[in-house]
Amino acid sequence: MKSQQQDEIEQAFLPIARPSTGPEEVEAVRQVLESGWLTQGPFVSRFEKAFAARHGATHALAVTSCTTALHLALVVLGIGPGDEVIIPAFTWVATANVVVHCGATPVFVDVDPISFNVEPAAVRAALTARTKAVIAVHLFGRVAPMDELRVVIPASIPIIEDAACATGASDQGRPAGSLGVMGCFSLHPRKTVTCGEGGVVTTNDGELALLLDTYRNHGASIPEEVRHRGARPWELPEFKVFGFNYRMTDIQAAVAEVQLRKLDRFLEERRALAALYDDRLKRIEWLKSPDRPDHMGHSLQAYVATVDSRIGALSRNRILEVLQENKIGARPGTHAVVALEAYRSRFGVDPQRFPGALEAESQSIALPLHNEMGASDIERVVQVLENAA
Ligand SMILES: *Cc1c(COP(=O)(O)O)cnc(C)c1O
């Protein structure tokens, strides 16, 4: 968190998110640049070990984004044309796009507009003989109801965690990334820790880890750095599958490793700022703070409140406008993917079947929350909101 003095200097515009980096990240990048090895190498390995340990998983594989992490997860499960993958109707569009990229069909399940998560009973109702996987999304850092989902979903159907927002999140002390067959994380600057662009897949399954490793590197039978540093670097690897280049660079891994060391402090700061929002927003009847159950180690990737426009005079969009006019960045929570043109036209999805997702999209408001802001910024946001209605 920054000091009062910095607050005053930077009061010009308060962004919704802002990466928090310092001289440690710069130094880490310098080391990589001077090492003569820039692509996936020793820094990636070190970052992966640290990430796996922090998230209670045996394996972690660094990739280029959470989107490519999710794509790889579906690929290594062998998902393809004719298969169905169940996903929430309210999520970032990437959760759905990766299903389409596999040639499979996304099957949407409505969400509860309070938790922003799917209800296990609704997931059960969406199961068919063609269901090959379920993607549970830990939206905004709130872990999906994994135990309840596991009970209603047959054991033969794997649950993938879309943990894009859930680096460092947990439920009853169990970390996100250790709760499904694979956990897919994002290192985009809108998330809790970042390296520009990046992603991670975690798993406790050694065979899947091996497949993930192969598919992220063109399908090569051995990783580049192992080959180049081994006894026969001139021997080209065998390619038994059609892979991708989803490798993370050592430059990004060096930054990500430093960020991961700061994760617990970042989470603590985010939780303190969120608690302050919770307290101050009690004064505003028409704005509901995000629901955060006690057993949940919510990672607060975003602080997403809900506007009740029946009580307040202003619509959610008007409130976004007022905040912008007052130099405060705010955004809708995320998409009702079912209402997006691509999904309506290709899959004939009727958005009206997803009232929870539509309500979440039209009433949610993500307020500024990041590690470069302080208590006075929260007071400022709340003051503008109070004067808005
Ligand atoms: C951000 C996000 C993604 C995509 O992450 P990238 O690293 O940007 O590809 C996927 N799913 C959810 C829920 C997200 O919030």
Image: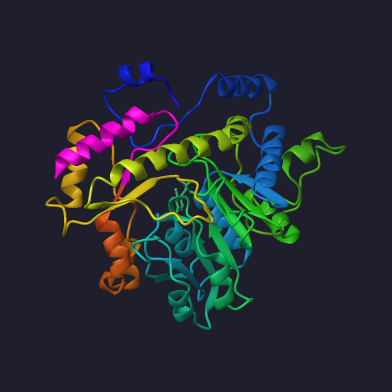
Q: Residue furthest bottom?
A: 129
- Residue 356, horizontal then vertical, whole percent: 31, 67
Q: Is residue 137 left or right of residue 386?
A: right
Quadrant assignment for the N terminus: top left
Q: Nearer the viewer, residue 236 or 191?
A: 191
Reply yes or no: does residue 90 show up in magenta.
Answer: no
Image coordinates of residue 292 in percent, x first then y, are 44, 54
Q: Is residue 373 left or right of residue 33?
A: left
385 falls in the magenta region = yes
The residue sitting at the left extreme is 313
Identify the residue shown where x is 48% and y is 48%.
165
Segment tinted magenta in the rendering: 366-389
**Count of all numbered marks drawn on residues in the image:** 0
Q: Residue at x 41, y 20 (%)?
A: 3
Q: Nearer the viewer, residue 278 or 14?
A: 278
Up/down of 199 relative to 106, above or below = above
The C terminus sits in image quarter = top left
Does the rendering let one see residue 121?
Answer: yes
Query: From the viewer's perspective, is 210 left or right of 190?
Result: right
- Relative image position of residue 353 (x, y in whole percent): 29, 74
Viewer-closest of 272 and 199: 272
Q: Position of residue 15 (x, y in %)?
A: 32, 33
320 above or below 372?
Answer: below
Q: Residue at x 32, y 30 (%)?
A: 377
Is residue 148 shown above or below 101?
below
What residue appears at the point 28 percent right and 73 percent down from the top-left corner?
A: 350
Does residue 193 appear in this view? no
**Side of 91 relative to 27 (left or right):** left
* Residue situated in front as seen by the camera: 191 or 276: 276
